[in-house]
Amino acid sequence: MKSTQVLLKPAVYIIGAGPGDPELLTLKAYKILSQADVILYADSLVPKQILQDVRADAELVATGNKTLEQIIPLAIDRVRQGKSVVRLHSGDLTLYSAIGEQMQAFTEADIPFELIPGISAFQAAAAKLSTELTIPELVQTIILTRISGKASSVPEAEELASLAAHRASLCLYLAARHIETAQEKLLEHYPEDTPVAVCYRVGWQDEQIWVVPLSEMAAVTREHDLIRTTLYLISPALQEAVTTRSRLYHPEHNHLFRPAKKG
C-alpha cells in the first residue's frame, strides 16, 4: 500500500488495529502508523505483521506486561518532547478497549489525542463466513456482549440469558474461559441446534473457524484448548438460506432516488 505523507502533530493517536489482518487497517490508521515517532502497542493482542511498515527509526514499546501507570506517563513524556505517539489497540476502540481512563488521563495532562476506529472481529468473522447477520423476517438485531470475568463484570440488566431471550445475532466476546456457563445461559432461549461460529484469532495467520450447533460450543472450545482471542457468533442467520428478499433493491420499492416500477 502506498502511503501519502501526513503531518502528524505532537499528540497521542489511539488506533484500533482491527482483528489482525494488516490489510484491514483503515487507510487513515495505516498512514499514521507508518509515520509515527513512537508506537505503544498491545503485543498480546496485536500481531507483529501490523507493524510491518512502521518507520525503521520508530520507537516500539510493547505494553502487554505494563500497567496504565507505566503506559500513560511514557506517552505523555514523548508528546511533550514534540513526538507523535500511537497507542495501538486491537479490534475497534468502541469494544472492550479500556480507552476511557486513558482519554481522561490525557485530558487532565492537557495532552491532545485523536481516535481512529478499527474493524471489529465480529465484522471480519461474518465476512469470512459469507454471512449477513441481519436477514429480513429472520433476524434484524445484532447484540455485542461478553460474560462476566475477572477483569470486568456485566451489569445485571445485561446478563447473558436475558439478552439471549431476543434470539438475535449475538456476538459473544471474552467468553472462552467461561464457555460452559455461557452455553448454559444461551440454551435457556436459543434452540440447541442454533448454529454457532467459534472464531479463533480472526485475521491472524493461524485463524481457525468452526461452525457447530450451540449444544457443542463448549465441547469444541475445550477440544481445541481455546482460552483467549476467541469470538462466538450465535445466529440463525448462519444456517438460513435467504428466502425473503430485502425491499431495498426491489423494483416495486419506491424511495427518494428511485421511483417504483408499476405493472
Image (tube, grey):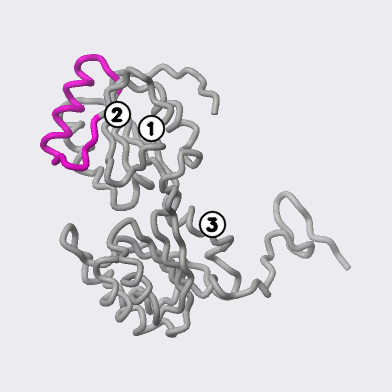
Secondary element at image label 2 = strand
Contact, CB < 8 Å: mark 2 with mark 1?
A: yes
Label 3 sits on a secondary structure element that is helix
> How many residues crowd mark 1 within 10 Å: few (<14), some (14–19), many (20+)?
some
Task: Give residue 228's mark.
Answer: none
Query: What's the magenta region?
Result: 61-84
Q: How many marks?
A: 3
Residue underneath mark 2: 39
**Residue 211 or 144: which is nearer the viewer?**
211
Q: Quadrant of the N terminus?
A: top right
What residue type is disc 2 on? Ile
User: Residue 259: percent from the left, percent from the top?
Assistant: 78, 55
Residue 89 placement: quadrant? top left
Q: CA distance from mark 1 to mark 3?
A: 23 Å
Residue 28 position, x and y percent, is: 46, 31
Tag 1 secondary structure: helix
Using the image, tell me which numbered label, if any, was put on residue 128: 3
Marked residue nearer the N-terminal end (1 or 3): 1
* Residue 180 sits above or below residue 36 on the image: below
| Between 30 and 258, the one nearer to me in the picture | 30
Query: Which amino acid is tagged 1?
Result: Leu
Q: Which mark is residue 51?
A: 1
